[in-house]
Image (spheres, grey):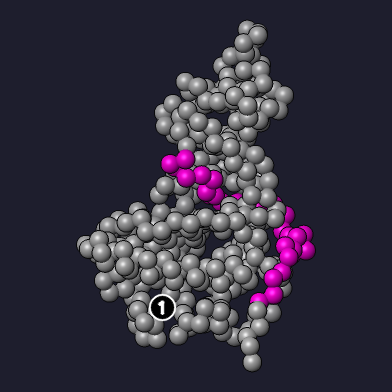
Amino acid sequence: MNEMSPIELPPIPMSHRDHTVGFGKGWYCVAESAEISADTLLPVSYFDRELIVFRDKNGDAKVSDAYCPHLGAHLASADGCIDQGEIVCPFHKWRFDATSGKCNSIPYTKFVPPQAKLSFYPTMEMNGMVLMWWHNAGAEPEAKPYNVIEAHSDKVWLPAFERSFETTVPLRDLHENIFDTAHIQQLHRSNGMPEIADVVRHDFGLEVNFEAMPDGERTAIHFMQFNFSGMSMVSHVVLGTGYGFCQNNTITPIDRERSLMRIRMFMLDTGSPEMNEQIGKAFAARVMTEIDQDMKVLNFKKHLERPLICAGDGPIMKWREYAEELMAA
């Protein structure tokens, strides 16, 4: 009997799959550090709004709403620019200080309204990412995200792989996938069922430790840990005999329908460029195969408010309780 081809589903509107209001609080990746400079405005679209990302004259990353408070011109349209530490609106050439957001001058009047100011979002950089803090009510950041490279700074990590792509997964269901240990065996055909040893709450989010897997896999795993910063970023570390990898996976909502997922993989330096390349390619290929398998399901998934959980599903409800707290803020 010939194997049936998978059904190609059309896009399913999120209104039919997830009734969540707003986006969960947390740090979200909105740009790569290498993409921004002190002389360029980078226009991006996230959180169902238009933003600009840039550096001020001190080199600090900044994120602002993209529209001028004067008459609503998009600051990166036409000849809008950042010039000598000031953002210049393309419409009437109002000049805003790129550090404070305050309007410094208007070319056709000496009076500058005191409320003329750009609003900045809390912003930081980490491991090549520009991170912006989002809170539905505009509250200030509560904690810095987990830094996997810093936490394992006793090791030498080399960039191994990067990829970004759009998804249509319900936002809080993406990382729930990690708590769903049964799918690793059923969907990814793993030889063994991974087992979560414990889940620890921190200021930044959740730490999830897995049991070692010395048997049942072609490559033994001695240490595996996930750290979640909000629901927007997960840092993953895998260590075995003579090898190791860590990842930063981020997801940022573009609008209600789509999100951008970024994957950054680093590998432990083996001391041999040839071995680094061989191991890095093999691990990256395996990770991306599993992610592609996940996305073929997750992109069409519905967020069930009351899922039917059975024995062996993994601690999915621990993630649900955590995600609900983030969404409620």
Residue 17 shown in magenta: yes
What secondary structure is marked by label 1?
loop
In which quadrant of the rendered view does residue 42 lie? top right
Q: Where is mark 1, residue-wise? A: 211
Give the image location of residue 146, x and y in percent. 44, 55
Q: Residue furthest left?
A: 271
| Res 320 seen here | no
- Where 223 falls versus 79 (above or below)? below
| Res 145 seen here | yes
Q: Nearer the viewer, residue 123 or 138?
A: 123
In which quadrant of the rendered view does residue 259 lie? bottom right
Q: Residue at x 39, y 82 (%)?
A: 217
Give the image location of residue 202, x and y in percent. 47, 59
Q: Nearer the viewer, residue 79 or 316?
A: 79
Q: Residue furthest right?
A: 16
Q: Residue furthest bottom?
A: 1
- Where 263 falls versus 44 (above or below)? below
Give the image location of residue 4, x and y in percent. 66, 83
Q: Amino acid at mark 1?
A: Glu
Q: Residue at x 44, y 26 (%)?
A: 57
Decide: few, some or many residues near mark 1? Use Cα within 10 Å; few <14, some 14-19, many ≥20: some
Q: State which quarter of the image contains the N terminus.
A: bottom right
- Where 231 falls versus 27 (above or below)? below
In which quadrant of the rendered view does residue 89 lie? top right
Give the image location of residue 137, x and y in percent. 66, 44
Magenta range: 6-35
Count of numbered circles on the image: 1
Q: Residue at x 58, y 54 (%)?
A: 260
Q: Residue at x 59, y 24 (%)?
A: 79
Residue 184 shown in magenta: no
- Where 323 falls versus 85 (above or below)? below
